[in-house]
């Protein structure tokens, strides 16, 4: 496994975008027209990163509130403590396998999450076998920002489901 510091999040997301938006005539799930509709209005052209926003809520306080709500919804959740500078770094420090069907090097995902920590006040709240739950202190404030963040989400996790303005949940099938 590599180090998160050795990866540029913008380059990773652009590469993943190109991979997941490529039209594959042998794809039996989505024809070319439907595949490009999924990434509208950008199509196959990577739109770049969403701009950094100042936190509108204290990131640690919001993460604590989300963690309490998460534990209410999932009471059998176990607590794990990891010696790492941040939640993003903890993903790599524990040797998490991550979404192996997409990428075998979890440090690449850690690099993107670390970037989201800085740009959006993201905090890792929960991690499962194939899931990642983040609280978000500075969610997008306009439709344009939301489209750019949605593009980042698609590149990061094509199986992504967004469950609310102040948290981002990802799962890989």
Image: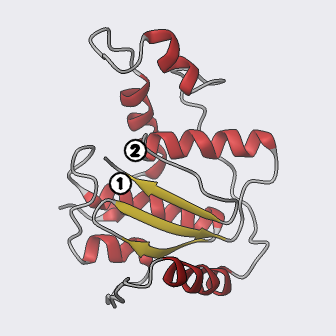
Q: Which residue is painted at 37% across and 71% down in the image?
A: 127
At numbered mark 2, what does the secondary structure look like: helix, strand or loop? helix
In the image, which disc is placed on residue 48?
none
Q: Nearer the viewer, residue 165 or 119?
A: 165
At numbered mark 1, what does the secondary structure look like: helix, strand or loop? loop
- In the depicted structure, whether residue 4 falls above or below residue 160: below
Number of the front mark, 2 or 1? 2
On the rendered image, what quadrant is the N terminus found in?
A: bottom left
Q: Which residue is mark 1?
A: 7
Lower position in the chain sequence, tag 2 or tag 1: 1
Q: Is residue 91 left or right of residue 95?
A: right
Q: Which residue is mark 2?
A: 12
Q: Which residue is painted at 54% across and 83% down in the image?
A: 72
Question: Horizontal and vertical percent for residue 94?
Answer: 24, 77
Q: Which residue is painted at 42% across and 51% down in the image?
A: 8
**CA distance for labels 2 and 1:** 7 Å
How packed mark 1 is, by other alpha carbons closer than 10 Å (few <14, some 14-19, many 20 or more), is: some
Query: Based on the displayed image, in which of its 4 quarters is residue 135 positioned?
Result: bottom right
Query: Based on the displayed image, in which of its 4 quarters is residue 79 positioned?
Result: bottom left
Check if mark 2's residue and mark 1's residue have beta carbons within 8 Å: yes
Q: Is residue 136 left or right of residue 36?
A: right
């Amino acid at each position: 496994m590599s180090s998160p510091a050795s990866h540029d999040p913008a380059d990773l997301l652009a590469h993943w975008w190109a991979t997941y938006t490529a039209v594959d005539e042998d794809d039996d799930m989505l024809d070319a027209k439907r595949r490009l509709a999924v990434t509208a209005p950008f199509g196959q052209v990577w739109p770049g990163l969403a701009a950094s926003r100042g936190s509108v809520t204290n990131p640690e306080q919001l993460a604590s509130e989300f963690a309490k709500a998460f534990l209410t919804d999932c009471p059998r959740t176990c607590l794990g403590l990891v010696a790492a500078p941040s939640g993003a770094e903890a993903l790599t420090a524990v040797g998490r396998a991550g979404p192996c069907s997409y990428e075998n090097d979890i440090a690449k995902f850690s690099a993107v999450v670390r970037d989201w920590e800085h740009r959006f006040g993201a905090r890792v709240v929960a991690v499962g076998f194939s899931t990642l739950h983040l609280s978000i202190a500075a969610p997008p404030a306009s439709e344009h920002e939301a489209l750019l963040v949605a593009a980042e989400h698609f590149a990061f996790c094509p199986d992504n489901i967004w469950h609310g303005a102040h948290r981002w949940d990802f799962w890989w099938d």
